[in-house]
Image (cartoon, grey):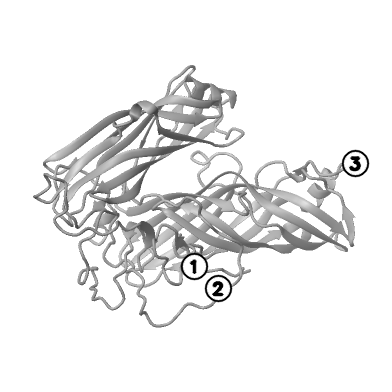
């Protein structure tokens, strides 16, 4: 019963409002802006009472991209393409406004010989609630589509992903309202029967057991006003809210809560420029062995910006029940997808001290796939983090003498790990695994996405290319010194900050919505 709010709606209640809207959009492709058609289907209850949950059902987003998109993919020698979509949906009631993110995924489809390319994504979307009477309108907004093309042999293309941004076209003006749902009995004029308050901004979080939950409203009562466990008491009815706080989930921070968090250590900026209700951020740091040099170097405290996916309830044929949460992310340092520069010192060939300044540079998607096996009283969590990262060398000094490696010294391809599911995740990429145990009613142990913890893996460092200056080729020297398999990695992720929270959670976010917890590396 406690997991009921996480389950996708399996059926539509009697008295439904079905939506089927085909809207003209303009999508920005590598070849330039192109017209596209976006079809959105969903089902809603025809009418709800104040405080009653509105859960969209049977939501699909179909994007029909023109022939130019097929040409862009054909130029990459793509045979299939997998799509993920994020549709911004405006929620308005009376004078109040909020925004929801409808995320969806699609199975890989073949790239046609000629256009158009039709991609249909499906997924669970956040529920809506409002305590105020009046008509609630949902409006289609901007759409982002991430394409992951693959060649005929299943390998990733170069580049490994394409990001397509779409906005309603000029012809869509006045047509983007998807549904208008009456809330309460007296909705003829659209005026509220009780004084509305500003809509709260939702955020993803975790329950005390570490289970990922849908976004929930985080509002605070005025200092000194009464409040109850369910947020009632001393409050006027609230405007539209996205998501639902599940029983056992975290309550909003209280100004009068005893104790204060420890001072936050210095850390690089970690700012989400355009947060959504599902945005998270966190710091990560740790060690990586370099087996050939018989040593380890510290990966510095680095910022990761995460877009959490909607939880999906997955019953298996063996009778087990799983909760799956797919998420995506990016490293972030001074506007680039990379770690801060870091130095490592080793004894090359066993006697010559060498210091190198390096960065890990993200060259493709970073995904976070969480799988929680629900088995009372213990829930077992496995989270796989996959990332395409190259190691770039900026500066090398051997026994104090600078070795000019030039501006383009890097591994010839991504760092590579053993992949447990190569058919689903082809190509060269790093794989880290975090395992956690979630005891009902207690905090999680090990790793969960929202709480952090240790992530471990093994990586092969590829050969180097582009190293050297003035006609001197240092590729073989660096490859002989560093490259090779069997390099153990242990990274520690800190507690995430739910960036979409209007008032940051004490101990999790700073006042300017950056992660409060800065982890320390562990061997």
Q: In this view of the protein, can residue 483 be seen by the observer?
A: no
Q: Nearer the viewer, mark 3 or mark 1?
A: 1
Question: Where residue 470 is drawn, which disc sits there?
Answer: 3
Q: Residue at x 50, y 38 (%)?
A: 423
Residue 259 position (above or below residue 179)? below
Along the line of sight, the residue nearer the viewer: 186 or 291: 186
Sort mark 2 into few (<14), some (14-19) or many (20+) by Cα contacts within 10 Å.
few
Question: Where residue 510 is drawn, which disc sits there?
Answer: 1
Judged from this view, the residue extending furthest toward the left is 185
Q: Residue at x 29, y 61 (%)?
A: 245
Q: Residue at x 49, y 17 (%)?
A: 113
Q: Earlier in the sequence, mark 3 or mark 1?
A: 3
Q: Earlier in the sequence, mark 3 or mark 2?
A: 2
Q: In this view of the protein, can residue 420 be seen by the observer?
A: yes
For mark 2, give the secondary structure. loop
Q: Nearer the viewer, mark 3 or mark 2?
A: 2
| Quadrant the C terminus occupies | bottom right
Q: Position of residue 219 (x, y in %)?
A: 32, 65
Q: Contact (CB < 8 A) between labels 3 and 1?
A: no
Along the line of sight, the residue nearer the viewer: 433 or 273: 273
Q: Quadrant of residue 212?
A: bottom left
Q: Contact (CB < 8 A) between labels 2 and 1?
A: yes
| Quadrant the N terminus occupies | bottom left
- How far apart in space, not on screen, are marks 2 and 1 (Cα)? 9 Å
Along the line of sight, the residue nearer the viewer: 91 or 69: 91
Q: Position of residue 195 (x, y in %)?
A: 19, 59
**Left or right of 481: which side holds 151?**
left
Q: Which residue is mark 2?
A: 264
- How far apart in space, not on screen, are marks 3 and 2 (Cα)? 46 Å
């Amino acid at each position: 019963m406690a997991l009921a709010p996480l389950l996708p709606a399996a059926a539509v209640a009697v008295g439904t409002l079905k939506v089927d809207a085909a809207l003209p959009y303009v999508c920005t492709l590598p070849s330039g802006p192109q017209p596209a058609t976006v079809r959105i289907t969903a089902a809603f209850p025809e009418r709800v009472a104040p405080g009653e949950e509105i859960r969209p059902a049977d939501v699909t987003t179909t994007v029909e991209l023109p022939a130019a998109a097929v040409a862009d993919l054909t130029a990459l020698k793509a045979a299939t393409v997998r799509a993920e979509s994020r549709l911004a949906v405006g929620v308005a009631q009376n004078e109040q406004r909020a925004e929801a993110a409808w995320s969806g995924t699609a199975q890989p489809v073949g790239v046609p010989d000629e256009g158009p390319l039709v991609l249909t994504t499906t997924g669970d979307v956040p529920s809506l609630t409002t305590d105020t009477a009046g008509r609630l309108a949902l409006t289609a907004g901007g759409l982002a589509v991430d394409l992951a093309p693959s060649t005929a042999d299943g390998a990733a293309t170069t580049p490994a992903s394409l990001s397509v941004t779409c906005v309603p076209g000029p012809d869509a003006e006045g047509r983007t309202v998807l549904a208008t749902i009456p809330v309460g009995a007296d909705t003829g004029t659209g005026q509220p029967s009780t004084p509305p308050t500003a809509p709260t901004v939702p955020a993803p979080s975790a329950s005390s057991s570490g289970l990922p939950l849908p976004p929930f409203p985080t509002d605070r009562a005025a200092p000194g006003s009464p409040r109850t466990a369910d947020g009632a008491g001393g409050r006027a009815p609230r405007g539209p809210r996205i998501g639902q706080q599940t029983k056992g989930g975290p309550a909003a921070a209280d100004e009068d809560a005893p104790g204060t968090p420890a001072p936050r250590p210095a850390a690089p900026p970690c700012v989400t420029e355009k947060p959504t209700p599902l945005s998270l951020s966190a710091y990560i740091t740790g060690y990586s062995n370099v087996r050939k040099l018989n040593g380890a170097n510290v990966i510095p405290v680095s910022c990761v910006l995460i877009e959490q996916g909607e939880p999906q309830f997955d019953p298996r044929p063996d009778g087990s029940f799983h909760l799956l949460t797919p998420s995506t992310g990016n490293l972030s340092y001074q506007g680039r997808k990379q770690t801060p520069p870091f130095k490592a010192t080793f004894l090359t060939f066993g006697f010559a001290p060498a210091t190198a300044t390096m960065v890990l540079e993200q060259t493709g998607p970073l995904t976070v796939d969480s799988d929680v096996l629900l088995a009372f009283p213990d829930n077992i969590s496995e989270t796989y983090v996959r990332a395409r990262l190259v190691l770039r060398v900026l500066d090398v000094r051997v026994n104090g003498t600078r070795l000019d490696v030039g501006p383009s010294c890097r591994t010839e391809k991504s760092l590579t790990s053993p992949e447990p599911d190569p058919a689903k995740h082809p190509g060269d990429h790093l794989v880290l695994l975090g395992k956690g145990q979630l005891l009902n009613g207690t905090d999680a142990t090990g790793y969960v996405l929202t709480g952090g913890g240790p992530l471990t893996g093994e990586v092969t460092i590829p050969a180097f290319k582009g190293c050297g200056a003035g006609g001197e080729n240092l590729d073989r020297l660096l490859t002989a010194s560093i490259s090779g398999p069997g390099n153990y990695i242990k990274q520690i992720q800190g507690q995430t900050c739910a960036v979409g929270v209007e008032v940051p959670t004490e101990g999790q976010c700073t006042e300017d919505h950056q992660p409060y917890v800065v982890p320390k590396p562990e061997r």
